[in-house]
Image (cartoon, helix red, strand yellow):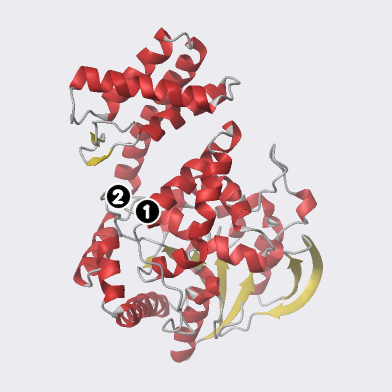
Amino acid sequence: MSSTIQRIVKRDGTVVAYDRDRIATAIFKAAAAVGGSDRAMADRLAQLVERKLEANFGAASTPSVEEIQDLVEETLIKDGHAKTARAYILYRHERQMERARRAYKFEATDNIPYKKIYEVLRWNMDHGCETVDGLNEIIAAGRLPQLIADCERRYDEEVQAGAQMFVERLPHVRVFFIAGPSSSSKTTTTIKVSEKLAEAGREFLALNIDHYFFDLEQHPKDEFGDYDYETPYALDLKLIDRHVAELLAGKSIKTPHYDFKTGKRQLEVYDMKLAKNQILLIDSLHGLYGEMTQSTPNDQKFKLYIETLGQVRNREGLFMRWADNRLLRRMIRDSWHRNLQPEQTLTHWHYVRRSELRNIIPFIGSVDYLVNSAMPFELPILKARLFKYFPPAMDKFRNDPKRQDAYVRAKRVYETLKDLTPVEDDGPVPKTSLLREFIGGSAYKY
C-alpha cells in the first residue's frame, strides 16, 4: 500500500523523497545491535510509524526527519520493543554528536573544499551535465563524445596546474605526493603528473607503495573473514619511511614486490636510487599519513590530493556521493586486478570508508593542491557494466543484520543510477583517460 506522504524535510532544510524502507532499515539496525534478526518485524513497525505520520500530520504532509524519528521511538516503546528503542535512541544521539563534531571540525579545518565543490557544480551546469536528465539529453542528442572531450580537457588542465605549482617550489622540495581515497585515480594522475614534469625538463623516480603491503596473512580479519587492506598499518610504514629517507640521502635501496593475487610479498627485489636532480614521486592512498614519511621534513614535500568531487543529481534532487562513484570504479578494477567479484567489493567497502574517514580525509587541510577526478560521462558507462549487480545485492542483504551497510549502499547507488541511460560503447573514451584505469583499454601500464 502506497503512502500519502511523498516528501520529507531533512535537517538542512532540503526536501527529498519519502522512503519507508529507510525507516525499516534504521529500526532493523537498532534491533541487530541488541541481537535481533527479524527484518519482517522492522518492516511492520515502519508501517506503524507511517500510519501514525499520516494520522498526526495529515495526507500529503511533509514531516521532518526529527518528527519521524520521534515517532519511531514512540512506536518501538509502545509496541514492546524496549531494547531496540534504547539502541535506536543511543544511535540517534551518537549521530547528533557526530554531526556537531563534524560541523565544528569543518569550520576549524575546512576539510570540505567548499570553493572547489562550487566550481565543479558550475562547470557541470555550464555543460548541462549536473543532473541525470541532463546526461540523458546529452546521450540522446549524440553529444556524449563532446562531453568526454571537455571533461578530459578540464582534468588535464588541473593536473598541469598542480605540476606547475610544484615546479615553482623546486629545488628545495624533493618529494611529490599524490594522495587520495580509493579509486580516485591516483595512479593515472601520477602518470600524467610525470608527463607534465618531463615536459618541464624535470626527471622523476616513482616509488610504488603498493609493493610495501605486508603478507595478507598478517592483516587483521573481521567477523566475515575479510582482510583489511585499507588501514595504513597494512603497509610496512617503517620500511617506507626508511627507504624514502635513504633515497633522499642519495643511497641505493631494494624495494619489495607484492602480488595481490597471492597476497605475498618478496623483499629486496627492485633496485632504486634517486639522483641529485631527480624528483621522488609517490602515489599512495595514505600519502598524507604522517608515519609513512616522518623522517622527511615537511618543507621537502609537495602534496597533491585527488578526489571524485562529482556534482550530479538524480531525479529526487540528491547528489551522488563521491564514495559511491569510487565504489563503482573499484568494483570493476577489483574484478580483474584483485580477482574479486563486484559483490565482494561492495561488502568490503565498509573497510574503505572507515579508513578514509580516519586516515585520509582529516588531513585534506594539509595539502598543497586539489584535483577533481570525477567525470560526469563515466556514470552511464559504469552503469552499463555494473547496474545488474545492485538489485540482487539489495535482495541478498536486505534481511541480513550484519550486512545493512552493504544493503543501504547498494540501494543508494541503485536509486542514483536507475533513471540514467546506460552507455555500452566506451570507444569515445581516450586511451589516456583516467577512466581507463578502471574499465581497461588504457595506453598506460598499471
Give the vertical position of 100 relative to 238 (above or below). above
The residue at which mark 1 appears reads as 416
Circle 1 crowding by C-alpha within 10 Å: few under 14, some 14–19, many from 20: many
Of residue 125 and residue 163, the one placed in the foreground of this image is: 125
* Residue type beneath disc 1: Thr
- Residue 208 placement (x, y as % from top left): 64, 71
Q: Can residue 30 be seen?
A: no
Q: In the depicted view, which residue is nearer to us: 305 or 399?
A: 399
The answer to whether 322 appears left or right of 318 in the picture is right
Residue 9 is drawn in which quadrant? top left
Q: Residue at x 58, y 42 (%)?
A: 396
What residue appears at the point 30 percent right and 54 percent down from the top-left corner? 314
Screen quadrant of the C terminus: bottom right
Tell me whether circle 2 and circle 1 mark residues in contact (CB < 8 Å). Answer: yes
Residue shown at 29% from the left, 59% from the top: 117
Compared to residue 32, the image places residue 143 above or below, namely below
Callout 1: helix, strand or loop?
helix
Q: Which residue is mark 2?
A: 318
Determine whether, in the image, residue 63 is placed left or right of residue 37: left
Q: Nearer the viewer, mark 2 or mark 1?
A: 1
**Is residue 51 visible to the viewer in this orientation of the structure?**
yes
Which amino acid, mark 2? Leu
Find residue 221 and report its image quarter: top right
Position of the N terminus by quadrant: top left
Going by the picture, which residue comes out furthest to the front?
Answer: 1
